[in-house]
Amino acid sequence: MDQFTINLLFVGASFALYIGIAIWARAGSTSEFYAAGRGVHPVTNGMATAADWMSAASFISMAGLIAFTGYDNSSFLMGWTGGYVLLALLLAPYLRKFGKFTVSEFIGDRFYSPTARLVAVVCLIVASTTYVIGQMTGVGVAFGRFLEVDNTTGLLIGAVIVFAYAVFGGMKGVTYTQVAQYCVLILAYTIPAIFISLQLTGNPIPALGLFGDHAASGEPLLAKLDAIVKELGFNEYTAHHADTLNMVLFTLSLMIGTAGLPHVIMRFFTVPKVADARWSAGWALVFIALLYLTAPAVGAMARLNITEMMWPNGGIDGGAVTVQQIENDQRYAWMATWEKTGLLGWEDKNGDGAIQYYNDQSADLQAIAAEKGWTGNELTNFNRDILVLANPEIANLPGWVIGLVAAGGLAAALSTAAGLLLAISSAVSHDLIKGSLNPNISEKGELMSARVAMAVAICVATYLGLNPPGFAAQTVALAFGLAAASIFPALMMGIFSTKINNTGAVAGMLAGLTVTLVYIFLHKGWFFVPDTNSFTDAEPLLGTVKSTSFGAIGAMINFAVAYLVAGMTKETPEEIKALVESVRIPRGAGTAQDH
Amino acid sequence: MADHNTPQASDGAYWAANLRIIFISLVIWALVSFGFGILLRPALSGIAVGGTDLGFWFAQQGSILVFLVLIFNYAWRMNKLDREYGVDEE
């Protein structure tokens, strides 16, 4: 069987599974559509949350981000997991107790302010829409690479699948497909990692292999990697080169942003009890940690593998890989495969018949290059996404593993897309239509409008996925910045302080939001229009604080302004104080429904 | 009705106990990530772990494992506290 057929089988089987779940889990009421009837088991919800949260970026890009930078990108690992501590301790149980359907509804009720609710809805929709564009393009790309259809067709197939289970099943359909998608993606991620860890270190658990010994040389794996990349003029893998202040703020921004992302928070509305919401956050992190503990191992091992392949005879003195080897040796066949996708490229610049891969910006290596007659790094294009996508081929793993990786990448992108679309559609139907435009809408009418909103959201996301705005790559900072600077502080103050009143909350959210947006626009261009930026992240406005790290400062501004303004304006009414008191105590949470 | 030996949630003791657990948990949360993983890494550089130092381990693995312990510990303690104060569900 050829690779294409195997890939098709794996992807086809996983899609048949998702469709089957869609038919089984149809939503019959708004409670089922928005919150899966609040009958989801905490472990099941933990698994669904893990799939909801881990996007194409976590699956495809994160290991590469760590592999090329080493220690300095540990921020992603700590930030994207540490947010769950904030979510579990500060938000999830109380919002479950509140027992409504959307994040913005809590903000509107707690701050007795339609304006606050509207600000939250706008933040939610902007953050979720920018986030969903990346998922949709990810679906197209994954299809394009593994199934040889063009990106447009791939994206449309993906959109139809999401449509099938999200429009009919709502949260209920999305929950159970996310569970299936989690299983697919975690197998797809860990199986190649186990093979590679066994090959390199003899340890079947990649997370332990990372700190184990390199089997071929007997040295510790990380010491070996440090030495090999240093010889080629790159930064030592385990050393700290990043600016410390920026690293701390970036990690904190990712943590606060993670805890404030509505599509993640709303998953905790689906469990039966407050106690379940607490457990469920723990289970979510267990399932996330399975991937996040593996990712740094994948990154380090793939970096070592590829670097050794480029210098197969023991470092610079042994000589680089020859063009002839790349073209004829079976072990290098993946290079030709991935060159076609535009993610990898090489060029024998000095015509010596070999491909020298080194850091041509390093002064030490420039000296060596001059001596040996090299004229620049000849591995000219080396996209970081290759590390995960081509890993099975680089390690020479069987064809079915490659098929599994294809299905896994699609599962990661589709599960996150569905969660985001659900957050958008419930904000539209529940907060905008039911909450302000037509409060008397019937249950049936609201369910219908939720489905229509979902269908429209999928169409918009598909359109944006097909015609991604030029700024798509920059919008992750925007989504996290908005969540960190506006949504997280409002929710936290709403639960932990009775003092914050309507004016304080609105002023705080708008202040945090505005300052963060302005800071991002100053560095990335106004509304992401190129060349309208006054600063760059290499030379930021405030010391070393990059625009991607500003969310934490935006959150502080939100807190400070809210307290100041609340202190100067009318006190919170007694009935709202009573609402806060009731949210703090688990007894009396809404009843559950069996599935 | 709760009997006389049961502490009352309404006097604020339940919430104060919750805040205390949250505070201690968040101190540990910050210590393992921002502390051991980043700021205190130079101070821990003498402790070798698998070819590198303890700070690197905390930044790439240790902090995640501690986060897991923190969340499960919080859930367990709070669910117990709910029962002690008679504010659990059912």
Image (tube, coloured by chain):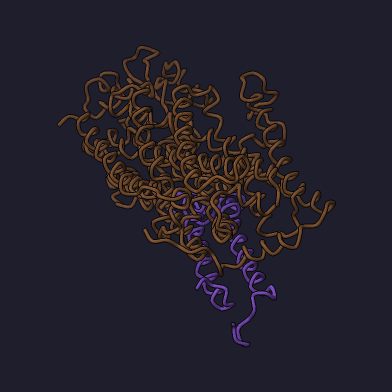
Chain colours: A brown, B purple
x and y percent of residue A279 in the render?
Answer: 47, 62
x and y percent of residue A406 in the render?
Answer: 31, 35
Name the residue: 65% across, 26% down: A536
Name the residue: 70% across, 43% down: A115
Where B29 sits versus A343, above or below? below
Q: Quadrant of residue A231?
A: top left
The answer to whether residue A570 is left or right of residue A521 is right
x and y percent of residue A93 in the render?
Answer: 55, 61
Q: Residue furthest top?
A: A351
The answer to whether residue B25 is left or right of residue A503 is left
Q: Quadrant of residue A169?
A: top left
Where A84 sits versus A543, above or below? below
Residues A221 and A313: in front is A221
Q: Which image quarter holds the C terminus of chain A?
A: bottom left
The answer to whether residue A252 is left or right of residue A48 is right
Name the residue: 53% across, 23% down: A469
Residues B25 and A239: in front is B25
Where A367 sits versus A426, above or below? above
Q: Residue furthest left?
A: A1
Does residue A153 appear in this view?
yes
x and y percent of residue A549 in the render?
Answer: 63, 39
Q: Quadrant of residue A5?
A: top left
Q: Which image quarter holds the N terminus of chain A?
A: top left
Q: Residue furthest bottom?
A: B4
